Image: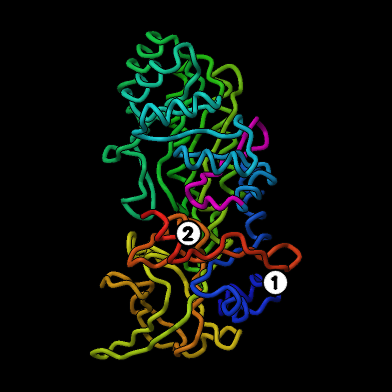
Amino acid sequence: MNSFIENVNFFEGNNPEKLAQEFGTPLYVYNEKILRNRMDAVAKVITKYKYTANYSVKANTNIHILKLALEEGNNCDAMSVGEIQMLLKAGFPTDRIFFVPNNVSAEEMQFAIDNGIMTSCDSLAQLELYGSLNKGGKVAVRINPGVGAGHHEKVVTGGKKTKFGISEEFIPQIFEIADRYNLTIAGINQHIGSLFMDPQPYLDAVTNLLRIALQFKDLEFVDFGGGYGIPYHKLDDEAVFPMEDFKKRLEPILDDFVAKYGKPVLFKSEPGRFCVAEGSVILGRVHAVKHNNGKTFAGTDIGMNVLVRPSMYDSWHDIEVIRDGKVVPRDKLMEQTVTGNICESGDLLAKDRQLPEMQRGDLACVLDTGAYGWSMCSTYNSRPRPAEVLICKDGSVKLIRRRETIEDLMRLF
């Protein structure tokens, strides 16, 4: 593929150079059509039984994007009181929010209880705390299924080496605590990891969780977690996640459980990245090109403070080069390392990457930045966080978060 942004008409007729000049760089740019398309797709993963797709808002908490999720029929998972408050601000009713924290304080848990938000407890200790705060209440528990999957060990959230969930061997203690505080175990949930492109590990985990669910009486819901991947190597024609094949293989697993359990329950999933990653790019300015010891470095203003995934996870993000508002063809490539402007040797966007030759003044367009992009931004090196704009369905451009200022940083002192 020569250009993803041209193939999907990402900018909907808007000139990216003019966007960069009007709103400054670095700049997060979102495409409403793509976001809605992905959110609609996850809402239809299960159609035979009652089902909700709970968008995992840690991927992107911009309130304008949360409103799109609400309109597309997604429920949401929140991991903190801050995320709950973002969802309430976006208009989500409390019965469409699932609080799935770990290691939280009594105050955070009480906030969810006071607002009538279903909460999942990640450990026996947290279940004990919940019982002491809400005797006779309903609660869910997060199960560690003993298996995990993901693109990096730091995003594997199931298995013997992770901090998440309650191991199956401790299920009797779950029942003991529930009896002591007269709690109803309304649901169980899991999450095995993030960014898998092969559905089989997820299907195996679903099968295993449903086997575990048979040990719980009168469950209202079972939540399988999320983690559906997206093709980060688009320019090399990486295949998309096989959603339709996945859905066909999932349904008989659900049929088998319903037959054994004697009744259907509400099924849930927790997609995050799949909903928003492909719906955003970052535009950054190339400020310097230099040659050191036979290597070419293109220095941009997209530092690890703006997009930390490459530095934290060694993650790959395709980069397109834009010059005078147009994509530079990929017919002539040369090896370059694309860096940010942060005082860290690990501040690399792309190492030894084959790209069109970059020049000072070009725009680096980093693809697939809608998930774990702005939500993981920092003010490291005292650099204010970037603005976000949304290209609406009609092609108009809307500022959905203003650029932070030095004055904003100073207000905390």
What is the quadrant of the C terminus in the image?
bottom left
- Total residue callouts: 2
* Residue 386 falls inside the magenta stretch: no
Give the quarter of the image for residue 15. bottom right
Tell me what residue is drawn at x 55 percent, y 44 percent.
86
Percent across and percent down for residue 64 are 62, 53
Query: Judging from the image, what secondary structure is the residue with disc 2 in?
Result: helix
User: Which residue extends farthest left?
Assistant: 293
- What residue sits right under mark 1 in the picture? 12
Percent across and percent down for residue 137 are 49, 15
Q: Which mark is residue 374?
A: 2
* Mark 1 neighbour class, 10 Å CA radius: few under 14, some 14 to 19, many 20 or more: some
Q: Which residues are magenta?
A: 46-63
**Distance CA(mark 1)–CA(mark 2):** 22 Å
Front residue of 63 and 203: 63
Residue 60 drawn above or below residue 82: below
Amino acid on which disc 1 is placed? Glu
Tell me what residue is drawn at x 63 percent, y 76 percent.
6
Q: Is residue 58 left or right of residue 244?
A: left
Q: Which mark is residue 356?
A: none
Q: Nearer the viewer, mark 1 or mark 2?
A: 2
Residue 314 drawn above or below residue 225: below
Amino acid on which disc 2 is placed? Trp
